[in-house]
Image (spheres, grey):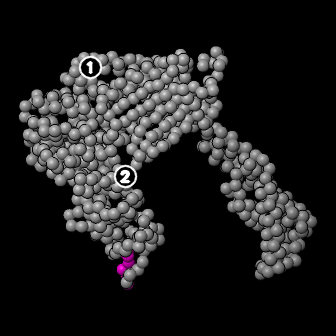
Amino acid sequence: MEPLLRAKYRYIRIQFILIAFLGSIIFSIRYFSEGDVNTALWTVLLIALEVSVGGLTIWKVFQFYQPRATFSFNPLFILVTLTLMYGLAFYTLSNYNPWISRDQLYNIGWPFHLVGMLCVYWILFYEWWFLKNEIRNDYNLQRLLNLQEDLKNSEIKNIQQNIQPHFLYNSLNSINSLMLIDQDEAQKMVVKLSDFLRYSVLKNQEMFDRIEDELQQLERYFSIEKIRFPSRLFYQLECSEELLPRKMPSMILQPLVDNAIKYGLYGQIDRCDIHIRFTEVNETLYIEVSNNFDGSSEQKAGTGYGLKSLHQKLFWLYGDDNLLKTTRDGNLFKATIRLPQLKNENLNY
Amino acid sequence: MRTLIIDDESLSRSLIRKFCERSGQIEVIGECENGFEAVKAIDEMKPDLIFLDVQMPKLSGIEVLELIAHQPKVVFSTAFDQYAVEAFEKRAIDYLLKPYLYERFEKAIQNVMQTQSLGWAEGLQEEWHKESKPQRLVIKDGDKINLIEHTEILHIDAYDDYVKVFTHEGRFLKKQTMAHLERTLPEDQFIRIHRSHIVSVDKIARVESVDKGKYQVVMKNEVRMPISRNAYPSLKERLGW
């Protein structure tokens, strides 16, 4: 059974036991002090009614209230209000009901009413301190399980992303055409594609790559795509000499490039210009991927898995959630990644 | 057989051209690299056959079919558009899955030559609409092709063989049946209130009673349309009273 449900059932069972226990104590005290079964029974019944009504009211009010770690005056305020309402209800009931006389009701004695109220508040106390912790633990457990599931899926997706079936597929299709049209080009493409795949598989195992190698891979990718769209795709990879040997995290550019191609090339019928630029400002590396797109359509930074894993990776590596920025200016879309460069040799930067 | 080759990749077009030459039966009269060019070329040149790529930028191959007046025979080609493939299979239509060899190409040509009917038009579009759930209508207005998002549509009226689509920008005529639209437009956005009227649920301002048992819809732009007796209960249910 689900741990949360188990906790709830346990809670309910304990409540029943304690209430039965309390009930019998009240009954015994009353019986032995008054010597009358009826009075004793009435007392227990009335206390039970008080506790039930009070408990139900509080449950209804607090049902969706999330216990906070810090102290808050809100529940206290609600409790005071409830007490006053309860007092008023009791007063009205005792004076204006046709079933029990006022004296009989009052005869129960204020200590027992007090006990009734304390039971109600105790229910709340329990809810707050113990159940809160239980639930939190159970949620933590659930989150851990979800995380593990996520990680497993992401490993699989990672591999899929690396192989990039669509790209592979399109390239093979182009090679098929080229074999009848221009055999030299077909051969070149076969070689280019296998280089691309080889590097893809290799970099899957590394966290960081040299910028120079990433650029080479991008060059292969784009030149293969350009064979499919020679008059529509134009690209420019810009990076200064000194940045080439530096390291950058692997697999972070591909989702942005895919996105640029999706909107810039597939999403419009005009010419597509994609510009990738590496710059360094104040020991921070900036990578800019920009493309033109159809202004009337909505280009986003990219939905789905690629972007999520990009964010996660950046956050994991640099502890910053704000390293990816996108801007839209007319029909120019620009995605910028910011990578703080630490000058620590050991960290492989 | 006079043929047009429609594909956004120039390599694919060259390959098909080569295959056509090899077959000896097909005369290539032109090439188009996007849907807009294709619609124009098909209506102007009236080819007997077209090779139609399904995935093209902005206007898909199947949307091109919706917009042409002249109806040639079609050999579809697709890479991996799952919606197209499913639609084709449901309609038992042949398609070329890229990459393909000459033998496969030849077989497709023979299939096409042997069939008399086109068979693909209305049924295929409906199937494709059901599978891919596009968010827009494509309508031709003279030489201009309009891509109208479903959210822009106020209501649609029947108009003989056509339908009149009303948006804030104006009204557009499309050669389509009300029944087809009723079947393919998303149920949560549109409802058919009458034999001649389909309305966008979001654009309804209120429903008024006109006479005993007769009701009408009042749109946010004050346009009024009658609700048929049959449609009234389901409209009530949709609007939630």
> In the rendered structure, which amino acid carries the disc numbered 2?
Gln
Direction from residue A326 to residue A167 in the image, left or right: left
> Mark 1 falls on what kind of element?
helix
Q: How crowded is mark 1: few (under 14 residues within 10 Å), some or many (20 or more)?
A: some
- Chain at numbered mark 1: A
Direction from residue B15 to residue A227 in the image, left or right: right
- Snapshot quadrant of residue B224: bottom left
Tell me if residue B3 can be seen.
yes
Residue beneath label 2, please? B135
User: Considering depth in this image, is A292 or A259 the residue closer to the camera?
Assistant: A292
Using the image, tell me which numbered label, if any, was put on residue B28: none
User: Considering depth in this image, is A141 or A261 the residue closer to the camera?
Assistant: A261
User: Considering depth in this image, is A213 or A238 the residue closer to the camera?
Assistant: A238
Residue at the location (33% across, 16% down)? A191
Residue at the location (29% across, 35% down)? B79
Residue at the location (87% across, 77% down)? A103
Cβ atoms at labels 1 and 2 below 8 Å apart? no
Indicate the position of residue B68 as horizontal and vertical percent values.
20, 51
Which residues are drawn in magenta? B212-218
Tell me if residue A209 can be seen.
no
Above or below, B132 against A57 in this view is: above
Indicate the position of residue B146 as horizontal and vertical percent values.
31, 54
Above or below, B52 against A103 in this view is: above
Residue beneath label 1, please? A185
Indicate the position of residue A20 as horizontal and vertical percent values.
77, 57
